[in-house]
Amino acid sequence: MKNSGFSRRNFLSLGATAVVGSLITTTAVASNSRATPEQAEGPFFPKHRQADKNADMTQIEGIVGRATGEIITIAGRVLDTDGKPVNNALIDIWQADHKGRYRHEDAPETSPLDTNFQYWAQLKTGEDGSYNIKTIKPGKYPAIEDWIRPPHIHFKVARRGMRELTTQMYFANEPLNKKDRLYLGAPESERGSIVVDIKHGKGEFNIILAKV
């Protein structure tokens, strides 16, 4: 594994602004603490187009093989702060593969890409605000020398009339969560809403958006 100067500078910046970002989000939704905490987008949002961005990230259309790693299903609903479903919301989902490698030229992990893994999905919520993805549990990776990022999945959710939200979903019982600067940047009382317990390969992650 190899760290780049790009990653060091960007992750130092992300770590320093994590608490500030969480305070801004908390202020914006002070009337209802149920809104999902904002998390930094990070430096590895996909930059290049790809033909296959469907909800099954474990297989590339037209390729027989499957992604390496623990296959999981994440399902949930996107709701507003009144508990009403947000339909037709656009969700971007991106993550590292099982080795902690992103499909991004600035990624710190330099292991070969998993050619059977999709890395990025894009989908819309149903009438009841529901969504469902099939993916693999991502690996950890080095941000900087003394900071190893825990397994996590990025979500960006947008819908007209709602505040666009970028957040990260973490996995329960991961020791690295307790040391992660971005995870710890979320208000302590709200961290549970971005942690998912995977049981029998399935997890539930509900996302709550604040209204404009």
Image: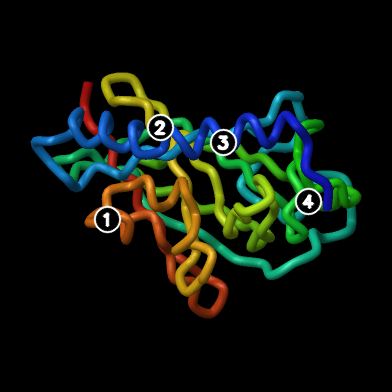
Residue sitting at x 67%, y 36% = 8
| 104 shown above or below 190 | above
Q: Position of residue 185 (x, y in %)?
A: 37, 45
* Residue 124 in sight here: no
* Residue nearest the observer in this picture, 106 or 52: 106
Instruction: Give the label, 4 or 3, closer to the camera.
Output: 3
| 18 shown above or below 202 | above
* Residue 63 in sight here: yes
Q: Which residue in the protein does label 4 denote? A: 117
Q: Which residue in the protein does label 1 denote? A: 188
Please rate how many residues cluster around mark 4, counting C-alpha atoms within 10 Å: few if below 14, some from 14 to 19, many from 20. many
Left or right of 163, for residue 176: right
Q: Position of residue 32 (x, y in %)?
A: 12, 41
- Mark 2 and mark 4 lie on one chain; the one further toward the N terminus is 2
Q: Which residue in the protein does label 3 denote? A: 12
Disc 2 from disc 4: Cα separation: 24 Å
Give amino acid for label 1: Glu
Circles 3 and 1: CB distance less than 8 Å?
no
